[in-house]
Amino acid sequence: MLYGKGGVALVGDRYHADDVAGIYFYDATENRIGWTAGAGVEWAFTPEWSVKLEYDYYGFGTRSLLFTDTTLGGGNVPVNISQTIQLVTLGVNFHARSGPDW
C-alpha cells in the first residue's frame, strides 16, 4: 500500500549557546506551529503483521528569537532561527483482529 499524509505540526524548542570564551551562556525557548507532509509504503507479509517505510518533512519557517544571558544578567541577543526536520521511519506493525473471519 502506498500512502501520503499532511497536516499541521507543533514543536517545542529549547536552545542553549555559549560564547567562544565560555563566559556567557544564552538560553531561549519557544513553541512553533508549522506544516508537515509525508509519504510511505506498507506491506502486509501476514494477515497480522506488516512492515512500513515512511518519510516525513516538517517545516517551521524562520523566526527571530531573543536569547537571554543567564550568567551575568546581561542583555538579550536576537538570533534568526530557521527550522526544518526530515524523518525516515522503518517500522513493524501488529494488526489486532477483533473477531473471526466471516
Image: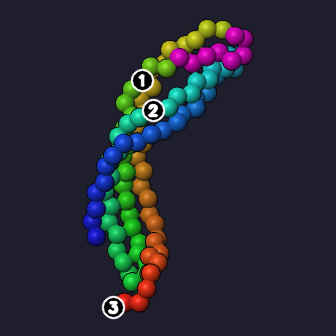
Give the quarter of the figure containing the C terminus. bottom left
Question: Which mark identifies residue 102?
Answer: 3
Q: Distance between the residues labelled 3 and 2?
A: 48 Å
Tell me the mark number nearer the camera, choosing from 3 and 2: 3
Residue 71 screen position, x and y as percent? 72, 16
Amino acid under disc 2? Arg
Question: In the rendered view, does 70 fall on the left or right side of 32?
Answer: right
Q: What stretch is highlighted in magenta?
A: 66-73
Q: Residue under circle 2? A: 32
* Quadrant housing residue 41: bottom left
Q: Residue under circle 1? A: 63
Residue at horizontal 45%, vertical 26%?
81
Q: Can residue 20 be seen in this view?
A: no
* Location of residue 39 with respect to 74 vertically, above or below: below
The reply to whether the C-beta atoms of the residues labelled 2 and 1 are less than 8 Å apart is yes
* Location of residue 99 with respect to 23 vertically, above or below: below
Dot 2 crowding, Cα within 10 Å, few <14, some 14–19, many 20+: some
Amino acid under disc 3? Trp
Question: In the rendered view, does 3 fall on the left or right side of 27?
Answer: left
SS of the residue under disc 3? loop
Residue 92 screen position, x and y as percent? 46, 71
Sequence-wise first label, 2 or 1: 2
Query: Is 68 included in the stretch rendered in magenta?
Result: yes
Q: How far apart are marks 1 and 3 (CA)?
A: 56 Å
Q: Is residue 14 visible?
A: yes
